[in-house]
Amino acid sequence: MPRKRHKPEEIVAKLRQVDVLTAQGQSVADAIRSIGVSEVTYHRWRNEFGGLKLDQVKRLKELELENGRLRKAVSDLTLDKLILQEAARGNVWSAPSVQVSRTIRRQQSA
């Protein structure tokens, strides 16, 4: 059975649904089963999205994506800087550095 990826909006709605059901007197375990996720998933979601509102969750996901893009840009620039430093020292054709940079470039393009 393929895993379902829940959108942040759906997660917040399901967490609220569990809160409503527990306030109505259902046990937490029964409420979790009624939304169709495991207890582990529920508690993981609770830790990540517990007190957030819908707009805050959207902003959190946007920031996580931007952070990933920025980390990739920094790693690319760091690699370029190291290659240029080595070239400036006159080690342009040193076998290990050329091999490493080629390997890294291939991995990034794949």
Image: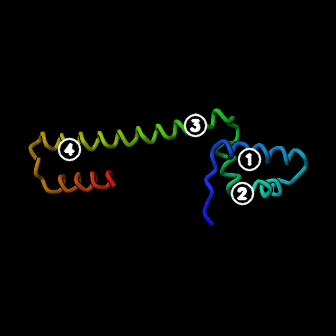
Question: Could you tell me if the residues under marks 2 and 3 are in contact, i.e. CB atoms within 8 Å?
Answer: no
Q: Earlier in the sequence, mark 1 or mark 3?
A: 1
The structure residue drawn at horizontal position 81% and vertical position 53%, both measured from the top left corner, is: 31
Neighbours of disc 1 within 10 Å: few (<14), some (14-19), many (20+):
many
The structure residue drawn at horizontal position 17% and vertical position 53%, both measured from the top left corner, is: 98
Closer to the camera in the image, 32 or 3: 3
- Find residue 83 and name its label: 4
Question: Could you tell me if the residues under marks 2 and 1 are in contact, i.e. CB atoms within 8 Å?
Answer: yes
Q: CA distance from mark 1 to mark 4?
A: 50 Å
Q: CA distance from mark 1 to mark 3?
A: 18 Å
Q: Position of residue 70 (x, y in %)?
A: 41, 38
Q: Which residue is mark 2?
A: 37
Q: Which residue is mark 1?
A: 14
Amino acid type for the residue under numbered disc 2: Val
Q: Earlier in the sequence, mark 4 or mark 3?
A: 3
Q: Position of residue 55 (x, y in %)?
A: 64, 32
Q: Is residue 62 left or right of residue 47?
A: left
Q: CA distance from mark 4 to mark 2?
A: 49 Å
Amino acid type for the residue under numbered disc 3: Leu
The structure residue drawn at horizontal position 52% and vertical position 36%, both measured from the top left corner, is: 63
Q: CA distance from mark 2 to mark 1?
A: 9 Å
Tag 3 secondary structure: helix
**Which picture quadrant has residue 110?**
bottom left
* Circle nearer the viewer, 1 or 4: 1
Q: Which residue is mark 3?
A: 60
The structure residue drawn at horizontal position 27% and vertical position 44%, both measured from the top left corner, is: 79
